[in-house]
């Protein structure tokens, strides 16, 4: 069965600190990878996606993620966080079986202290 | 372009009752997926409908069902409600297929409380 692991449940950072959130998945086939963000009181929004090609992908608001196939990882990074980045971050995997269903990690809550 | 619309936003039901949730996807999107979000289990896939056919189903009991209409709007039904069904139910609309599969746009969700 497919699964997605996010190792950090709650991360607290000061503004301007660098961020890296880990994501590992278990699936032997080809996957599409996503990071979604849920700001307080808002709906889930797509932060960035990887379909193929350059394993380093850039998303909105200065976020980027690197797909390392050999490690089954898709870690999210941001060089300098802002207070407005306070949110919950979800890593998700689509197994490319033809359907659109996503397997989500349990999420990482990020709190940025001004 | 209007986003994904879910109605109602909040619902309170009694154990044993049934409930129907509605989702209108983004115009042109033929794929609608449903997810259950709870603090303990996180986001779990319920089912996906594509062109009025259920294409994929998660690991939920048969009390959870859905359907999709010809205009791509979808409904989800939960019968014989249990306390554990209390959750945020999210609808996701997708255009992507094949190599672009999985990219989804989510609605605000319906918060269901079972008492």
Image (cartoon, rainbow, N blue to C red):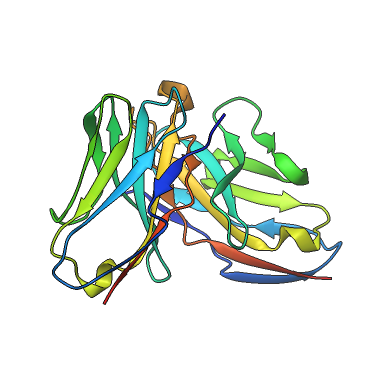
Residue B79 location, x and y as percent? 15, 58
A62 or A20: nearer the eye? A62
Q: How many marks?
A: 0
Place residue A80 in its image quadrant: bottom right
B61 or B107: nearer the eye? B107
Place residue A39 in its image quadrant: bottom right
B12 or A39: nearer the eye? B12
Residue B74 location, x and y as percent? 30, 38
Image quarter hosting the C terminus of chain B: bottom left
Left or right of residue B52: residue A98: right
Instruction: Point out the residue furthest to the right here.
Output: A16
- Residue at 66% of width from left, 50% of height from top? A76
Image quarter hosting the N terminus of chain B: top right
B88 or A80: nearer the eye? B88
Residue B25 location, x and y as percent? 42, 34
Q: Is residue A56 above or below residue B51?
A: below
Left or right of residue B36: residue A9: right
Left or right of residue B50: residue B53: left
Residue B71 location, x and y as percent? 32, 25
């Amino acid at each position: 069965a497919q699964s997605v692991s996010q190792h950090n449940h709650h991360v607290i950072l000061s503004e301007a600190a660098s961020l890296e959130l880990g994501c590992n998945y278990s699936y032997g086939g080809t996957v599409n990878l996503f990071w979604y963000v849920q700001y307080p009181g808002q709906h889930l929004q797509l932060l960035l996606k990887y379909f193929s090609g350059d394993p380093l992908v850039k998303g909105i608001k200065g976020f980027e993620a690197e797909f390392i196939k050999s490690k089954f990882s898709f870690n999210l990074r941001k060089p300098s966080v802002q207070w407005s980045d306070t949110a919950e971050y979800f890593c998700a995997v689509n197994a490319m079986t033809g359907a659109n269903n996503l397997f989500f990690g349990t999420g990482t809550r990020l709190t940025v202290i001004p | 372009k209007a986003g994904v619309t879910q109605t109602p936003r909040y619902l309170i039901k009694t154990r044993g009752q049934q409930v129907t949730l509605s989702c209108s996807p983004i115009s042109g999107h033929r794929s609608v997926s449903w997810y259950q979000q709870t603090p303990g289990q996180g986001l779990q896939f319920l089912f996906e409908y594509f062109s009025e056919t259920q294409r994929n189903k998660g690991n939920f009991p048969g009390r959870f069902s859905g359907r999709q209409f010809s205009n791509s709007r979808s409904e989800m039904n939960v019968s014989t409600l249990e306390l554990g069904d209390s959750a945020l139910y999210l609808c996701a609309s997708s255009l992507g297929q094949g190599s672009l599969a999985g990219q989804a746009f989510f609605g605000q969700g319906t918060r269901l409380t079972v008492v």
